[in-house]
Protein backbone atom coordinates (compact mmCIF):
# COMPACT_ATOMS: atom_id res chain seq x y z
CA UNK A 1 0.00 0.00 0.00
CA UNK A 2 1.14 3.53 -0.75
CA UNK A 3 2.06 5.35 2.46
CA UNK A 4 0.62 8.85 2.45
CA UNK A 5 2.79 10.82 4.86
CA UNK A 6 2.47 14.46 5.83
CA UNK A 7 5.82 16.20 6.29
CA UNK A 8 7.33 19.68 6.22
CA UNK A 9 11.06 20.46 6.24
CA UNK A 10 10.42 22.94 9.06
CA UNK A 11 9.38 20.07 11.35
CA UNK A 12 13.10 19.45 11.97
CA UNK A 13 15.18 22.02 13.84
CA UNK A 14 18.94 21.95 14.19
CA UNK A 15 20.08 22.57 17.76
CA UNK A 16 23.60 23.44 18.92
CA UNK A 17 23.13 21.40 22.09
CA UNK A 18 20.96 18.30 22.03
CA UNK A 19 18.61 17.93 24.99
CA UNK A 20 16.30 15.04 25.78
CA UNK A 21 13.84 16.08 23.08
CA UNK A 22 15.26 15.13 19.65
CA UNK A 23 14.36 18.15 17.50
CA UNK A 24 16.07 16.55 14.49
CA UNK A 25 14.21 13.25 14.59
CA UNK A 26 11.60 14.37 12.06
CA UNK A 27 14.21 14.62 9.32
CA UNK A 28 15.77 11.32 10.39
CA UNK A 29 12.36 9.62 10.25
CA UNK A 30 11.86 10.78 6.66
CA UNK A 31 15.33 9.53 5.76
CA UNK A 32 14.49 6.14 7.27
CA UNK A 33 11.24 6.02 5.30
CA UNK A 34 13.01 6.87 2.05
CA UNK A 35 15.74 4.30 2.71
CA UNK A 36 13.09 1.61 3.32
CA UNK A 37 12.23 1.58 -0.38
CA UNK A 38 8.52 1.58 0.42
CA UNK A 39 6.25 3.59 -1.91
CA UNK A 40 5.60 7.03 -0.41
CA UNK A 41 3.59 10.08 -1.30
CA UNK A 42 4.62 13.12 0.73
CA UNK A 43 2.08 15.86 1.43
CA UNK A 44 3.11 19.26 2.81
CA UNK A 45 0.88 20.79 5.50
CA UNK A 46 -0.06 24.40 6.02
CA UNK A 47 0.05 26.18 9.37
CA UNK A 48 -3.12 25.73 11.37
CA UNK A 49 -5.04 29.03 11.33
CA UNK A 50 -4.99 31.06 14.51
CA UNK A 51 -8.76 30.84 14.97
CA UNK A 52 -8.56 27.03 14.86
CA UNK A 53 -5.89 27.08 17.57
CA UNK A 54 -7.97 29.45 19.70
CA UNK A 55 -10.99 27.15 19.47
CA UNK A 56 -9.15 24.72 21.78
CA UNK A 57 -6.34 26.69 23.42
CA UNK A 58 -6.56 29.88 25.48
CA UNK A 59 -6.15 32.86 23.10
CA UNK A 60 -3.55 34.45 25.39
CA UNK A 61 -1.40 31.32 25.24
CA UNK A 62 -1.79 31.17 21.45
CA UNK A 63 -0.62 34.79 21.30
CA UNK A 64 2.40 33.95 23.46
CA UNK A 65 3.47 31.11 21.17
CA UNK A 66 2.86 33.00 17.93
CA UNK A 67 4.83 36.03 19.15
CA UNK A 68 7.53 33.98 20.93
CA UNK A 69 6.71 35.60 24.28
CA UNK A 70 5.96 32.43 26.24
CA UNK A 71 6.79 33.10 29.93
CA UNK A 72 9.85 31.35 31.32
CA UNK A 73 7.76 29.20 33.66
CA UNK A 74 5.72 27.83 30.76
CA UNK A 75 8.86 27.23 28.70
CA UNK A 76 10.30 25.19 31.57
CA UNK A 77 7.07 23.21 31.71
CA UNK A 78 7.29 22.57 27.96
CA UNK A 79 10.95 21.61 28.18
CA UNK A 80 12.53 23.84 25.54
CA UNK A 81 12.64 27.45 24.36
CA UNK A 82 9.85 28.71 22.12
CA UNK A 83 11.74 30.60 19.43
CA UNK A 84 10.54 31.47 15.94
CA UNK A 85 11.44 28.05 14.53
CA UNK A 86 9.61 26.15 17.29
CA UNK A 87 6.63 28.50 16.99
CA UNK A 88 6.48 27.81 13.25
CA UNK A 89 6.68 24.04 13.75
CA UNK A 90 4.04 24.21 16.47
CA UNK A 91 1.58 25.71 13.98
CA UNK A 92 2.57 23.35 11.16
CA UNK A 93 2.29 20.16 13.20
CA UNK A 94 -1.45 20.48 14.04
CA UNK A 95 -2.06 21.41 10.41
CA UNK A 96 -0.26 18.19 9.54
CA UNK A 97 -2.43 16.05 11.80
CA UNK A 98 -5.60 17.63 10.39
CA UNK A 99 -4.31 17.02 6.83
CA UNK A 100 -3.39 13.41 7.67
CA UNK A 101 -6.96 12.88 8.91
CA UNK A 102 -8.39 14.27 5.68
CA UNK A 103 -6.04 12.04 3.66
CA UNK A 104 -7.03 9.03 5.77
CA UNK A 105 -10.67 9.63 4.91
CA UNK A 106 -9.68 9.42 1.26
CA UNK A 107 -7.08 6.63 1.34
CA UNK A 108 -7.89 4.67 4.52
CA UNK A 109 -4.65 5.43 6.34
CA UNK A 110 -2.24 8.36 6.45
CA UNK A 111 0.51 9.47 8.80
CA UNK A 112 1.79 12.77 10.11
CA UNK A 113 5.57 12.63 10.55
CA UNK A 114 5.19 14.92 13.57
CA UNK A 115 2.45 15.56 16.13
CA UNK A 116 1.09 13.50 18.98
CA UNK A 117 1.54 16.46 21.36
CA UNK A 118 -0.79 15.02 23.97
CA UNK A 119 0.46 16.87 27.09
CA UNK A 120 -0.40 20.37 25.86
CA UNK A 121 -3.16 21.98 27.94
CA UNK A 122 -5.50 24.90 27.28
CA UNK A 123 -3.28 27.59 28.79
CA UNK A 124 0.20 26.07 28.47
CA UNK A 125 2.25 23.43 26.81
CA UNK A 126 3.94 20.68 28.81
CA UNK A 127 6.20 17.65 28.38
CA UNK A 128 7.74 18.71 25.03
CA UNK A 129 4.27 19.56 23.66
CA UNK A 130 3.25 23.09 22.60
CA UNK A 131 -0.18 22.82 20.91
CA UNK A 132 -2.33 19.70 21.21
CA UNK A 133 -2.66 18.63 17.57
CA UNK A 134 -4.85 15.63 18.46
CA UNK A 135 -7.50 17.68 20.24
CA UNK A 136 -7.22 20.45 17.65
CA UNK A 137 -7.69 18.12 14.69
CA UNK A 138 -10.55 16.24 16.34
CA UNK A 139 -12.35 19.47 17.21
CA UNK A 140 -11.93 20.88 13.71
CA UNK A 141 -13.11 17.70 11.98
CA UNK A 142 -16.26 17.57 14.11
CA UNK A 143 -16.89 21.32 13.83
CA UNK A 144 -16.75 21.20 10.05
CA UNK A 145 -18.91 18.09 9.78
CA UNK A 146 -16.09 15.91 8.45
CA UNK A 147 -16.56 13.45 11.32
CA UNK A 148 -19.36 12.80 13.79
CA UNK A 149 -17.37 10.73 16.31
CA UNK A 150 -13.59 10.66 16.67
CA UNK A 151 -11.57 8.16 18.70
CA UNK A 152 -8.22 9.45 19.92
CA UNK A 153 -6.25 6.27 20.61
CA UNK A 154 -3.15 7.10 22.63
CA UNK A 155 -0.51 4.37 22.74
CA UNK A 156 2.34 6.55 23.98
CA UNK A 157 3.95 5.28 27.19
CA UNK A 158 2.82 8.51 28.89
CA UNK A 159 -0.84 9.28 29.59
CA UNK A 160 -2.47 11.72 27.18
CA UNK A 161 -3.45 14.08 29.99
CA UNK A 162 -3.74 17.22 27.87
CA UNK A 163 -5.92 15.53 25.28
CA UNK A 164 -8.17 14.13 28.00
CA UNK A 165 -8.55 17.54 29.66
CA UNK A 166 -9.21 19.41 26.40
CA UNK A 167 -11.92 16.99 25.28
CA UNK A 168 -13.50 16.27 28.69
CA UNK A 169 -17.28 16.11 28.69
CA UNK A 170 -17.63 15.67 24.93
CA UNK A 171 -19.67 12.74 23.67
CA UNK A 172 -18.33 13.06 20.11
CA UNK A 173 -14.63 12.56 21.02
CA UNK A 174 -13.53 9.42 22.88
CA UNK A 175 -10.05 9.28 24.45
CA UNK A 176 -8.48 5.88 25.10
CA UNK A 177 -5.04 5.96 26.72
CA UNK A 178 -2.88 2.87 27.28
CA UNK A 179 0.12 3.97 29.34
CA UNK A 180 2.58 3.24 32.15
CA UNK A 181 0.88 3.98 35.46
CA UNK A 182 3.98 5.31 37.25
CA UNK A 183 5.35 7.38 34.38
CA UNK A 184 4.94 11.09 33.62
CA UNK A 185 2.65 12.91 34.26
CA UNK A 186 2.51 12.34 38.01
CA UNK A 187 -1.04 13.65 38.19
CA UNK A 188 -3.12 11.95 35.53
CA UNK A 189 -6.19 13.41 33.89
CA UNK A 190 -9.38 11.40 33.27
CA UNK A 191 -9.58 9.98 29.77
CA UNK A 192 -12.83 8.42 28.59
CA UNK A 193 -11.00 5.15 29.24
CA UNK A 194 -7.60 4.82 30.89
CA UNK A 195 -5.62 1.60 30.99
CA UNK A 196 -2.70 2.06 33.37
CA UNK A 197 -0.04 -0.65 33.15
CA UNK A 198 2.65 -1.59 35.68
CA UNK A 199 6.35 -1.07 35.03
CA UNK A 200 8.07 -3.72 32.90
CA UNK A 201 4.83 -4.81 31.23
CA UNK A 202 6.03 -6.90 28.30
CA UNK A 203 4.61 -7.76 24.91
CA UNK A 204 2.12 -10.40 26.04
CA UNK A 205 0.37 -8.49 28.81
CA UNK A 206 0.42 -5.25 26.80
CA UNK A 207 -1.20 -6.85 23.77
CA UNK A 208 -3.74 -8.62 25.97
CA UNK A 209 -4.80 -5.31 27.51
CA UNK A 210 -5.02 -3.63 24.10
CA UNK A 211 -6.94 -6.49 22.48
CA UNK A 212 -9.40 -6.53 25.38
CA UNK A 213 -10.15 -2.79 25.27
CA UNK A 214 -9.92 -1.58 21.68
CA UNK A 215 -12.50 -3.81 19.95
CA UNK A 216 -15.08 -2.99 22.64
CA UNK A 217 -14.49 0.74 22.24
CA UNK A 218 -14.69 0.53 18.45
CA UNK A 219 -17.94 -1.43 18.59
CA UNK A 220 -19.64 0.62 21.32
CA UNK A 221 -18.49 4.13 20.43
CA UNK A 222 -18.47 3.41 16.68
CA UNK A 223 -16.10 6.20 15.61
CA UNK A 224 -15.95 7.24 11.99
CA UNK A 225 -12.31 8.30 12.36
CA UNK A 226 -9.35 7.27 14.53
CA UNK A 227 -6.51 9.62 15.46
CA UNK A 228 -3.66 7.42 16.67
CA UNK A 229 -0.90 8.68 18.94
CA UNK A 230 1.63 6.06 17.83
CA UNK A 231 4.42 6.81 20.28
CA UNK A 232 7.25 4.27 20.32
CA UNK A 233 8.42 5.07 23.85
CA UNK A 234 6.82 1.91 25.22
CA UNK A 235 9.87 0.15 23.73
CA UNK A 236 12.23 -1.44 26.24
CA UNK A 237 15.22 0.55 24.97
CA UNK A 238 13.48 3.92 25.28
CA UNK A 239 15.10 6.47 27.58
CA UNK A 240 11.77 7.58 29.09
CA UNK A 241 9.73 4.40 28.73
CA UNK A 242 8.91 1.76 31.32
CA UNK A 243 6.91 -0.92 29.52
CA UNK A 244 9.61 -3.16 28.01
CA UNK A 245 8.05 -3.79 24.60
CA UNK A 246 10.26 -5.39 21.94
CA UNK A 247 10.44 -4.59 18.23
CA UNK A 248 8.07 -7.50 17.65
CA UNK A 249 5.75 -6.20 20.34
CA UNK A 250 5.48 -2.80 18.69
CA UNK A 251 4.92 -4.49 15.34
CA UNK A 252 2.10 -6.62 16.75
CA UNK A 253 0.59 -3.57 18.45
CA UNK A 254 0.52 -1.60 15.21
CA UNK A 255 -0.79 -4.49 13.12
CA UNK A 256 -3.57 -5.19 15.60
CA UNK A 257 -4.74 -1.56 15.66
CA UNK A 258 -4.66 -1.21 11.86
CA UNK A 259 -6.52 -4.47 11.28
CA UNK A 260 -9.23 -3.67 13.82
CA UNK A 261 -9.81 -0.32 12.13
CA UNK A 262 -9.62 -1.76 8.63
CA UNK A 263 -12.02 -4.58 9.47
CA UNK A 264 -14.63 -2.01 10.48
CA UNK A 265 -13.86 0.38 7.64
CA UNK A 266 -12.74 3.17 9.98
CA UNK A 267 -10.12 5.52 8.47
CA UNK A 268 -7.11 6.19 10.67
CA UNK A 269 -4.46 8.90 10.83
CA UNK A 270 -1.35 8.37 12.93
CA UNK A 271 0.89 10.91 14.64
CA UNK A 272 4.51 10.45 15.65
CA UNK A 273 4.31 10.70 19.42
CA UNK A 274 7.09 10.01 21.90
CA UNK A 275 10.39 8.27 21.41
CA UNK A 276 13.60 9.13 23.25
CA UNK A 277 17.17 7.91 23.35
CA UNK A 278 20.76 8.72 22.50
CA UNK A 279 20.74 6.66 19.31
CA UNK A 280 18.76 9.03 17.10
CA UNK A 281 18.98 6.79 14.03
CA UNK A 282 17.59 3.74 15.87
CA UNK A 283 14.82 5.95 17.22
CA UNK A 284 13.96 7.24 13.73
CA UNK A 285 13.88 3.70 12.35
CA UNK A 286 11.47 2.72 15.12
CA UNK A 287 9.10 5.56 14.21
CA UNK A 288 9.39 4.82 10.48
CA UNK A 289 8.71 1.13 11.05
CA UNK A 290 5.49 1.99 12.90
CA UNK A 291 4.21 4.05 9.95
CA UNK A 292 5.15 1.36 7.45
CA UNK A 293 3.60 -1.39 9.57
CA UNK A 294 0.35 0.52 9.96
CA UNK A 295 0.17 1.11 6.20
CA UNK A 296 1.01 -2.51 5.42
CA UNK A 297 -1.54 -3.90 7.86
CA UNK A 298 -4.21 -1.62 6.48
CA UNK A 299 -4.14 -3.04 2.96
Image (cartoon, grey):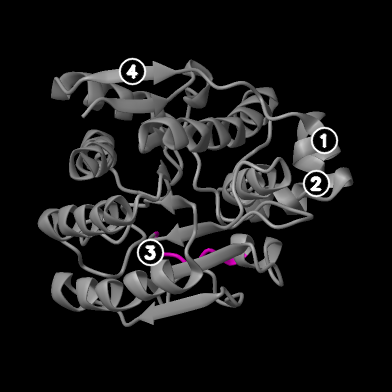
**Helix, strand or loop under label 4:** strand
- Quarter-wise, where is residue 22 in the image? top left
Q: Mark 3 or mark 1: name the one nearer the start of the chain.
A: 1
Mark 4 closeness class: few <14, some 14–19, many ≥20 residues within 10 Å = few
> Which residue is under mark 2?
55
**Of tags 4 and 3, which is closer to the observer?**
4
Are the residues flagged by discs 2 and 1 in contact, CB closer than 8 Å? yes
Tell me the CA gap for discs 4 and 3: 29 Å
Residue stretch rendered in magenta on the structure: 156-161
**Residue occupying image coordinates x 16% and y 58%:** 252
Where is residue 217 shown, x and y percent of the image?
42, 72
> Which residue is under mark 3?
157
For residue 193, side relative to residue 137 (left or right): left
Tell me the CA gap for discs 2 and 1: 6 Å
Q: Main secondary structure of the magenta part?
A: loop
Against 271, is 95 above or below?
above
Are the residues flagged by discs 3 and 1 in contact, CB closer than 8 Å? no
Tell me the CA gap for discs 2 and 3: 28 Å
Mark 1 closeness class: few <14, some 14–19, many ≥20 residues within 10 Å = few
159 part of magenta stretch: yes
Mark 2 closeness class: few <14, some 14–19, many ≥20 residues within 10 Å = few
Q: Mark 2 or mark 3: name the one nearer the start of the chain.
A: 2
**Residue occupying image coordinates x 58% and y 66%:** 161
Dividing the image into 4 quarters, which one contains the N terminus? top left
Against 166, is 275 above or below?
above
Tell me the CA gap for discs 4 and 1: 29 Å
> Which residue is under mark 4?
41
Q: Can residue 150 be seen in this view?
A: yes
Where is residue 30 shown, x and y percent of the image?
32, 24
Dividing the image into 4 quarters, which one contains the C terminus? top left
Amino acid sequence: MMLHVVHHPAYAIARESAGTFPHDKYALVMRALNESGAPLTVHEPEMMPREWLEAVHDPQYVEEVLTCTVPAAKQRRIGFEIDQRVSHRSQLSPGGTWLAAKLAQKHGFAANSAGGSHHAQAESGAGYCVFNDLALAAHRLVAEGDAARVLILDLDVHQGDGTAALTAGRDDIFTLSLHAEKNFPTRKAQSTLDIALPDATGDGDYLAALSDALPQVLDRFAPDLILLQAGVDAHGDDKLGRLSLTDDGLDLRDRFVAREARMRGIPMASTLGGGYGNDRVALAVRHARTMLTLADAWK
